[in-house]
Amino acid sequence: MATPLDVGTERRADGTTVLTAVGELDMSNVAVFGDAIAAARAASDGAILLVDLSGVDYLDSGAINILFEHADAIELVVNPILLPVLTVSGLTGVATVRPAPET
């Protein structure tokens, strides 16, 4: 059984393509996440893709690997709880990663 994950893509008025994920990213749904990033990158016409993970409370190494695969073409907005693991993994050294504003 797959862990619940909602993924959606939108294009903002300024032309920015945004992929939003809400839930948990783990081995049960990482393929769906990877496919969504690939499709959103294709739709962004070579522009940086904004990946909004502010609604993600957990991600495993499979999800981190997907993010590394696309690190040169994405900017991440993440739930602050994810910052330590993304820093330790080295992702913050190869991609723009910023915490989501606290609500």
Image: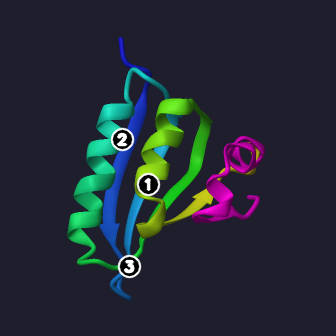
| Of callouts 2 and 1, the N-terminal one | 1
Disc 2 versus disc 1: distance between alpha carbons? 10 Å
Check disc 1 and report the residue beneath it. Answer: 20
Point out which mark residue 33 bears.
2
Which of the 4 image quadrants contains residue 30? top left
In x, y percent, where is residue 27?
43, 23
Magenta segment, which residues?
82-103
Disc 1 versus disc 3: distance between alpha carbons? 13 Å
Q: Judge the density around disc 3: few (<14), some (14-19), many (≥20) Cα neighbours within 10 Å.
A: some
Residue positioned 21% across, 69% down in the render? 43
Q: Judge the density around disc 1: few (<14), some (14-19), many (≥20) Cα neighbours within 10 Å.
A: many
**Does dot 2 land on a helix, a strand or a loop?**
helix
Front-lying residue, 43 or 88: 88
**Does dot 3 land on a helix, a strand or a loop?**
loop
| Of callouts 3 and 2, the N-terminal one | 3
Which of the 4 image quadrants contains residue 60? top right
Let me know if residue 33 is in the magenta part.
no
Point out which mark residue 16 bears.
3
Looking at the picture, which amino acid does disc 3 mark?
Thr
Where, quadrant-wise, is the N terminus in this rendering?
top left
Q: Judge the density around disc 2: few (<14), some (14-19), many (≥20) Cα neighbours within 10 Å.
A: many
Which of the 4 image quadrants contains residue 61? top right
Label 2 or label 1, whichever lies nearer to me, is 2
Q: Is residue 75 above or below residue 66?
A: below
Front-lying residue, 10 or 47: 47
Disc 3 versus disc 2: distance between alpha carbons? 19 Å
**Does dot 1 land on a helix, a strand or a loop?**
strand
Looking at the picture, which amino acid does disc 2 mark?
Phe
Q: Is residue 84 above or below residue 61?
A: below
Residue positioned 28% across, 77% down in the render? 46
Q: Is residue 4 above or below residue 18?
A: above
In x, y percent, where is residue 83?
73, 49
